[in-house]
Structure formats: structure tokens, C-alpha cells
Image (tube, rainbow, N blue to C red):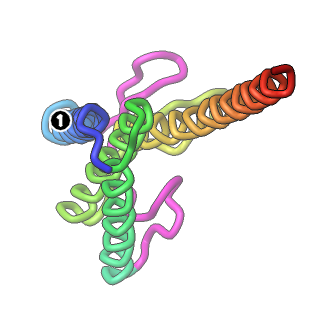
Amino acid sequence: MFHRRSMRAGTAALLFAFGLDQLTKWLIAAVVMQPPRVITITPFFNLTFGRNSGISFGLFAGGAEAGRWALTAVTLAIVVGLLVWLSRAERRWLAVALGLVTGGALGNILDRIRHGAVTDFLDFHLAGWHWPAFNLADSAIFMGAAFLLLDGLLDGRRAARRADSDLEAGSTARSNSNGS
């Protein structure tokens, strides 16, 4: 079943995540990092420039060209599944979560197709330890996944409350019919 309001919210989240990701990657690569360097923003955050040919945290980096295209194909298949899910989402928050994940995934897919790797530039660190650099697409995917978990938890609570209400209504109806 198609839910127009949810679909609109999810599509807006997808376009926002994708557009902001691509804009920031372009700004970093074409403007801010000319020449490439590390820019200290705070004592725990830098802007940097890197290309990640692997997946999360650089896993499977340095693979052959075939690996790049295989990873792109798998990610595209996941995006198709997410879009189908988005088209069926009844709740707006679920649709927004799916839109964020899908928009982020599409942003990283476009990088992989255009550059052979994903552009990363956000570098958080503490006491000499650096979290792997990431980008806004990764942030959108993370936030969308967190919203999906939250939506699942809240939906479970709603379902439990509905079940309790149904049980209560059923026992009230039975006691009313027994008392007549």
C-alpha cells in the first residue's frame, strides 16, 4: 500500500541527505582541500581529505576493480530494497529513517562510481586516537539506522499497548455479556 505523506517525507530525507553529502564532498575536494592538508577545527576534530575504497572503517580496501563494482552492485541492490520498503512505510519517522539511509547510500555509491572510492573528510580524535574518517552520507546512514531502531522499539511498545487494550476490551465485553 502506498502512503503518500510518508513517501513524501522519506523522499525529502533522501534528497536532503544525498544533496548535502554531495555538496560537502564537492566543497571539501574542490575548495577547502586545495592543497590537501589537515585543518584543525577543535582539539578533537579536524577536516582532512581521504578516499576509502573499502567499506565501513576501510574494511576490504585496496581490492581490485572488480571488487569496487561488486560492492557498488550489492549496495545498489540494498538501495532498491530500501526504496521498496520506503514506498510501503506507513509511519513518517520510518519513512524519514529509510530516506536518510538510502540518501546516504546513494551518495557513497556515486562517489564509488565517479572516483573509485568514497570521499571522507570528518576526522574526530582523542588522545592521539583517531576514529576512521567519514562523511555526511555515513552520518545520514547512521542516523537513519538509529531512527529505524527507535521506530522498531516504539512500534513494539505500541503493539503491546494495543494488545493490552484489546485484551481489556475483550474481557470487559465478556463480563458485560455475562452480567446481562
Question: 48 or 92, which is in the foreground?
Answer: 92
The residue under the point 42% across, 34% down is 91
Determine the image quadrant of residue 176.
top right
Q: Quadrant of the C terminus?
A: top right
In the rendered view, does 173 fall on the left or right side of 99? right
Q: Residue furthest left?
A: 30
Mark 1 Cα within 10 Å, few/some/many (few <14, many 20+)?
few
What residue is rendered at 52% in x and 31% in y?
124
User: Do we see residue 33 in this rendering?
Assistant: no
Q: Secondary structure at mark 1?
A: helix
Q: Is residue 71 magenta?
A: no
Q: Quadrant of residue 104?
A: top left
Residue 39 is one of the magenta-drawn residues: yes
Q: Residue at point 55% right, 34% down?
A: 151
Q: In this rendering, is residue 19 above or below 71? A: above
Q: Amino acid at mark 1?
A: Leu
Name the residue beneath numbered marker 1.
Answer: 23
Give the x, y percent position of residue 102. 33, 49
Using the image as rendered, state which of residue 35 and residue 7 is in the foreground: 7
Residue in the foreground of this view, choosing between 87 and 123: 87
59 or 16: nearer the viewer:
16
Above or below, 39 relative to 58: above
Q: On screen, 62 above or below 49?
A: below
Horizontally, residue 152 falls left or right of residue 123, namely right
* Residue bounds of the magenta highlight: 37-63
The residue lying at 37 percent from left, 62 percent from top is: 81
Q: Is residue 12 visible?
A: yes
Residue 55: percent from left, percent from top? 46, 61
Counting from the top left corner in percent of width and height, residue 165 is at 71, 26
Residue 161, position in %: x, y? 70, 27
Q: Give the vertical position of 64 relative to 52 (above or below).
A: below
